[in-house]
Amino acid sequence: MTRIHVTVGEAVLSATLDDTPAGRDFAALLPLELTLSDYHGIEKVADLPRKLDTTDAPARYAAKAGDITLYAPWGNLAIFYKPFQAAVGLVRLGAFDGDFESLLRHGSFKVSLARAD
């Protein structure tokens, strides 16, 4: 498992990536600066610079609040702030270790993701 920091403005949020092919491949992209935007009032999404390795990933996943996921069909990052039903192509990458309230902003905004040292 890889610990990361997600920086939103002055807030630094802690998260842990899963020890899976997709989680390790996402960690290999770090550091990243992404622009998050709201999607359907349940998640924040951002485009990734490339597709991730989804080898051995379950065909579907039911997201929980605080999950960091990949929506493989579109190749985008999806951070859920509300639970969501099982969706084909949704792959869990990891989850926030605690509070992630700083992500609940309106409109689009930049975040930085980096390995925690």
Image (spheres, rainbow, N blue to C red):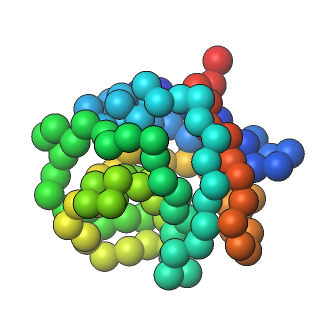
Left/right of residue 37 with respect to residue 24 in the rendered view: right
Toward the viewer: 42 or 107?
Answer: 107
Instruction: Name the outermost residue toward the bottom.
Output: 40
Check the image and report above or below for 56 versus 101. Answer: above
Check the image and report above or below for 82 versus 48. Answer: below
| Quadrant that contains the N terminus | top left
Instruction: Name the outermost residue toward the right.
Output: 10
Look at the image and tell me whether residue 71 can be seen. Answer: yes
Residue at image position (52%, 75%) is 39
Residue at image position (72%, 43%) is 7
Where residue 104 sits, quadrant-wise, is: bottom right
Residue at image position (50%, 81%) is 40
Left/right of residue 32 with respect to residue 70 in the rendered view: right
Instruction: Name the outermost residue toward the top.
Output: 117
Where residue 22 sits, quadrant-wise, is: top left
Left/right of residue 61 with respect to residue 82 in the rendered view: left
Q: Position of residue 45 (x, y in %)?
A: 51, 62
Left/right of residue 65 with respect to residue 22 in the rendered view: right
Q: Position of residue 15 (x, y in %)?
A: 56, 41
Residue at image position (16%, 52%) is 58
Toward the viewer: 79 or 19?
Answer: 79
